Image (cartoon, rainbow, N blue to C red):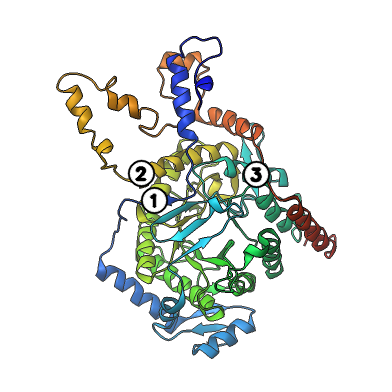
Amino acid sequence: MDEQQAQPSHGRRPSAREAKRAARAARAGISVPYITRKIPCYEVLGEEGLATIEHNADTILEEIGIDFRDDPEALSIWKAAGADIQGERVRMPRGMCRQLIQATAPREFVQHARNPSRDVPIGGNHTVFAPAYGSPFIRSLDEGRRYARIDDFRNFVKLAYLANSLHHSGGTICEPVDLPVNKRHLDMVYSHIKYSDKPFMGSVTHPERAADTVEMAKILFGEGYVDPLTGRPNTVIVSLINVNSPMTYDATMVGALKVYARANQACIVTPFILAGAMSPVTVAGTATQTLAEALAGMAFIQLLNPGAPMVFGSFASSLSMQSGAPTFGTPEPALVLYIMAAIARRLGVPFRSGGSLCASKIPDAQAAFESAQTLLPTCLAGVNFVLHVAGWLESGLAMGYEKFVIDADQAGMMHTLLEGVDLSDNGQAMAAIREVGPGKHFLGCAHTLANFESAFYRSPLADNNSFEQWQAEGSSDMATRANALWKKQLAGYVAPPLDPSVDEALLDFINRRKAAFPDSNV
């Protein structure tokens, strides 16, 4: 902020409120492409407990097996590797999957963005935040709940681009049901490319749609798509491969996995589990099944393309034993998350889990506490890639405009938490303590004046004023303030530059691909 911006045009001194807003704006302008974690990971099990989970997962793979349905090629690949094949059931010798993964899978990799300053390392001590994924509905204070449209998809890509606390554009931020199923993936991938320069995720709803994503990435990155040193494609796409729990991979997911793995693009192999329906009701049982399912998918990737990047994913929620509905923010899924993060570190692969999950239908107190009870364990556990950080409502059925910016604010707080404790001379603040001494205050000391703009996290949404001031300004609640914020952000959105020739080539590819499909919505 320059001096002219800091001073009102008529020359008066800024009010305290204006000064606070200026400091908040300065803080909000700080952006990092990813988080480098500086605090230790929290663990809930020791060596014996983790070894028990690992032993039991190998027992599942060896004795019970994993189904790979409607994919003869996958079965033949497993058979050639030494697995026992009975119909569509694959049983792997004890330790086989772990050995395949640890022999060739990278511990960490970089997903390249079209803007190189937005590249993200996935794994190690890094954390990457991405928005929510997959909702067919949207919700806002203005319209309530309705089906999502492609305009909503574009809006959320723009909001994710503008959010300094989010490092990734995500994937199917919402499902644009106004477009045909067999064509909408082209518009979604193009929206990520056009309206953001952050890294993005690919389509997984059909192998051909995965292949379209790869082709669009080749157009976007041009000569930069292939690493000249290795001759292998750079990893420019990360995509979500969900296991059809319990213990089943279907042809759609395996088909998309094969496309991406062979193209050296990263797959997040994630058992999607509602404990009590898709896994046992216990924490240890769910963790064991999660590990077995993920090991099978990750080992299969290494059989397809040794050295291909991948992420060990875990999505485990609890289930209401009374209604059968999924529940979020409860302690049992947090325990599963802590266990799986520790096992991923032992296995030596990046880990995905967590987010800001809730079952609430609107951005209310339930949404707030359930989301916080998911996001905080996510950060304490050491998750590397975090999907569903912003926007999730109604157990994932709805993407909320107000919820999105509220969650982005919470994600900003996690940046500060994971930064840890500053032990520099400035952080120790001994000069300030000497200057002030006993019985005085620190408000006017040199150290406070030097640090006041960056001291403490400043929320763009929280109201910390007096009751009288809050009342005078309209008595608005958090959701109302969030409604004004997302509208203001979209009104001020400016697209990142995209080479016109690349844009033209992408649109030409999209038009040709759409013309190849019939007009039916299948």
Q: How far apart are the two marked residues, 3 and 1, measured between alpha carbons?
A: 30 Å
3 or 1: mark nearer the eye: 3
What residue sits 39% from the left and 51% below the top? 379
Q: Secondary structure at mark 3?
A: loop
Tell me if label 1 and label 2 are in contact, CB under 8 Å.
yes
Q: Mark 3 or mark 2: which comes first in sequence? A: 2
Q: Quadrant of the C terminus?
A: bottom right
- Residue under label 3: 496
Residue 349: image location, x then y, percent: 42, 68
Horizontal side of residue 385 vs 419, given as left or right = right
What residue sits 63% from the left and 60% below the top? 202
Q: Report the disc number at residue 417.
A: 2
Q: How far apart are the two marked residues, 3 and 2, measured between alpha carbons?
A: 30 Å
Q: Mark 1 or mark 2: which comes first in sequence? A: 1
Q: Mark 3 or mark 1: which comes first in sequence? A: 1
In the image shown, does 223 or 238 lie closer to the viewer? 223
Task: Look at label 2 and name its amino acid.
Answer: Leu
- Residue under label 1: 379
Residue 78 visible? The answer is yes
Q: How far apart are the two marked residues, 1 and 2, measured between alpha carbons?
A: 9 Å
In the image shown, does 438 or 463 lie closer to the viewer? 438
Task: Look at label 3 and name its amino acid.
Answer: Pro
- Badge 3: few (under 14), some or many (20 or more) residues near its Cα, within 10 Å? few
Q: Secondary structure at mark 1?
A: helix
Tell me if label 3 and label 2 are in contact, CB under 8 Å.
no
Q: Report the disc number at residue 501.
A: none
What residue sits 42% from the left and 79% below the top? 103
Residue 376: image location, x then y, percent: 38, 47
| 55 in relation to 508, above or below | below
Task: Look at label 1 and name its amino acid.
Answer: Cys
What residue sits 57% from the left and 65% below the top? 235
